Image (cartoon, rainbow, N blue to C red):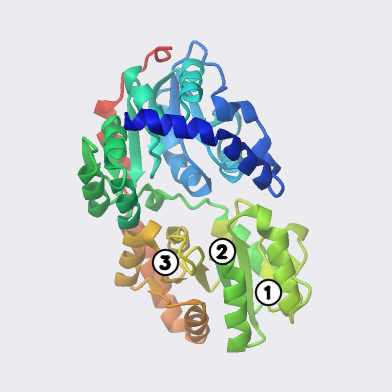
Amino acid sequence: MLRALYGFVVVLLLPFALARLAWRSRRQPGYLEHLGERFGVAPLAGAAPVIWVHAVSVGETRAAAPLVARLARDFPDARILLTHMTPTGRATGVELFGARVDRAWLPWDAGFAVRRFLVRARPAFGILLETEIWPNLLAQCRSRGIPVFLVNARLSARSAAGYARVAPLAREALGNLAGVAAQGADDAARFEALGARDVTVTGNIKFDLDVPADAEAKADALRALFGAGRRVWVAGSTREGEESLLVEAIEAAGLDPDILVVFVPRHPQRFDEVATLLTARGGPVARRSLGAAVPAGARYALGDSMGEMLAYYRAAELVVVGGSFLPLGGQNLIEACAVGRPVLFGPHTFNFEAAAEAAIDRGAGLRARDAAHAVAIAKELLGDAPRRKRMGEAALAFARDNRGALSRLEAWLAPRLPASRGPGRG
């Protein structure tokens, strides 16, 4: 009964969802592309079996890359369908996989859209990354005999409390999963308390990041643009409102003229907005997309490119990770550790809590109370090269020692996956 009510509400909200897409498309036109897919018009399955992987946005898509590679290796006759919810996630999928995978939007969780998606795509099984719990989708998959696994799964205490408010609906939805591979023991316990079955802990596959062989060369190219001899810190994956907080703190702190702060916003539709902010406070700002060198006296530069985050981090003396200075849950701090850079973050890291606390314990990271505290810590570290070196070495060891989640996930999934076969039932 509760799911029927949920489904009715979802249908009622579809016009508002369309209006929201139209609003967001003013800055990201991709939201209105392939609109039929939002209603389940997925690519039609052919004779080959279809493996469906859902990665909502950029971080999940990058985390999925090694998993997709292993699925392609283990199921050479299958096609992989990669679904997303955001244009940046979809663009990242194009960048990483090109034509090697099919792609579509995940349909809205209306019964008719979900049914159409499953009839057209006919997946043999599905793999959802992190925290994607859609009651109608999971119910339809189970009724059609399509096992769906939630992997690299995380569930913060705050999110668990939200699901607990609709406990019967959450219990049914999680019970329709074929299994959950959680990042940590706390995540696993929360999923089990809400009704998930066959729950295990495999770790965070974001630690299994492969740093490309050309990352150092790309970092050197960026350093040449930033200026020889300058001390650089990168504010990476910043979110709306955080740049202004950090800039205010930087201006108040009075950084030495040889220090350059490079902002790399999380969302590309905000590049122009952030460029305007930085220009207003520090004069004309050098943009990575233009390929020009940063003027010697500039305080700020803008990393307005995609797919270069590891190079930005490697080109810096230290990294401040965004999404953590406002209650947004934090962004991926593991990338900075993987290239051996000290990492700073704010008080709000509930999406990466285990990794953040472990980084602190290992001497790889520091938590700031607020933006002003982060700038003060950065200023101190930039004047202490031996400490930066120790933290960078600790960061590399922390990232290296936590690898292996992908192998554990693969070992857990293997006996639970259906043998390679034709498309699932329509």
**SS for callout 3:** loop
Closer to us: mark 3 or mark 2? Answer: 3
Q: CA distance from mark 3 to mark 1?
A: 25 Å
Residue beneath the point at 49% across and 21% down: 112
**SS for callout 1:** strand
Q: Nearer the viewer, residue 140 or 93?
A: 140
Q: Are marks 3 and 1 in contact (CB under 8 Å)?
A: no
- Please tell me how crowded label 3 is: few (under 14), some (14-19), or many (20+) other residues with Cα within 10 Å: many
Image disc number at residue 262: none
Q: Residue 262: where, in percent of width, then height?
A: 63, 70
The residue that mark 2 highlights is: 238
The residue that mark 3 highlights is: 348
Residue beneath the point at 34% across and 40% down: 151
Q: Nearer the viewer, residue 258 or 133?
A: 133
In the image, residue 146 sits, relative to residue 280, either above or below, namely above
- Please tell me how crowded label 2 is: few (under 14), some (14-19), or many (20+) other residues with Cα within 10 Å: many
The residue that mark 1 highlights is: 300
Is the C terminus in the top left, top right, bottom left or bottom right quadrant?
top left
Is the N terminus in the top left, top right, bottom left or bottom right quadrant?
top left
Q: Nearer the viewer, residue 302 or 38?
A: 38
**SS for callout 2:** strand
| Amino acid type indicated by mark 3 | His
